Image (cartoon, grey):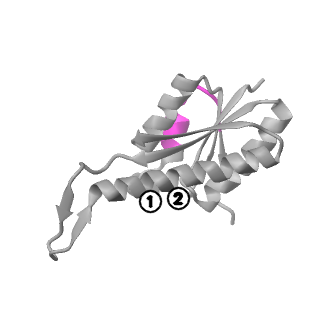
């Protein structure tokens, strides 16, 4: 029996499809939901000067990414609420697949539902694949929702 479903989201269509599946699964299992966004920690807090002379305010960029993550989990929580379910949300910083697995331990989630890009093996090896790393590192069952063909 599934009690708590962790649903990572990056705000994409495939993540929304995974969330829709997770909502139906939560209804069937009478499980709770946790929608998670991971803000990839890639930047130190300073203004970065590019060779072109332009600069990027990395702190403002990180704030925008966190806001986007909060909006993404908020949309999914609203979908769950519309379906008659309550849901938690969380936005954390870190490396996505590692933080997803960390949240399983921290929250007691016993199932993960995640969307996949559907990348082929070579592209996944070069570009990285969060879903593959979650599958291989997870202690709990993982349901992968493929990209719509």
76 or 98: nearer the eye?
Answer: 76
Q: Are marks 2 and 1 in contact (CB under 8 Å)?
A: yes
Which residue is the site of mark 1? 123
109 or 58: nearer the eye?
Answer: 58
Q: Give the crowd class for mark 2: few <14, some 14-19, many >=20 residues within 10 Å.
A: some
> Is residue 138 covered in magenta?
yes
Query: What residue sits 47% from the left and 50% below the top?
Result: 129
Residue 132 place in picture, x, y as percent = 52, 44
Q: Is 80 placed above or below 108 here?
A: below
- Name which quarter of the figure residue 49 lies in: bottom left
Residue 7 badge: none
- Name which quarter of the figure residue 8 lies in: top right
Query: What residue sits 28% from the left and 57% below the top?
Result: 58
Q: Is 143 placed above or below 63 here?
A: above
> Is residue 44 covered in magenta?
no
Residue 45 place in picture, x, y as percent = 24, 49
Q: Is residue 146 visible?
A: no
125 or 129: nearer the eye?
Answer: 129
Residue 119 badge: 2
Q: Is 73 placed above or below 119 here?
A: above
Instruction: Please tell me whether mark 1 sits on a helix, a strand or a loop.
Output: helix
Residue 114 place in picture, x, y as percent = 61, 45
Answer with left or right where residue 71 lies relative to residue 113.
Answer: left
The magenta segment? 132-142
Answer with left or right where residue 67 lies relative to residue 21.
Answer: left
């Amino acid at each position: 029996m599934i009690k708590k479903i962790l649903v990572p989201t990056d705000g994409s269509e495939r993540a929304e499809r995974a969330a829709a599946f997770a909502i139906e699964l939560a209804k069937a299992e009478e499980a709770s939901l946790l929608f998670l966004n991971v803000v990839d920690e890639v930047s130190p807090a300073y203004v970065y000067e590019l060779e072109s002379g332009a600069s990027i305010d990395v702190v403002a960029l990180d704030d925008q990414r966190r806001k986007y993550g909060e909006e993404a989990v908020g949309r999914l929580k609203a979908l769950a609420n519309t379906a008659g379910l309550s849901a938690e949300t969380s936005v954390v910083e870190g490396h996505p697949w590692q933080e997803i697995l960390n949240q399983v331990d921290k929250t007691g989630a016993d199932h993960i539902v995640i969307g996949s890009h559907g990348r082929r093996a070579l592209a996944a090896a070069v570009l990285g694949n969060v879903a593959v790393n979650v599958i291989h590192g997870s202690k709990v069952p993982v349901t992968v929702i493929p990209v719509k063909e």
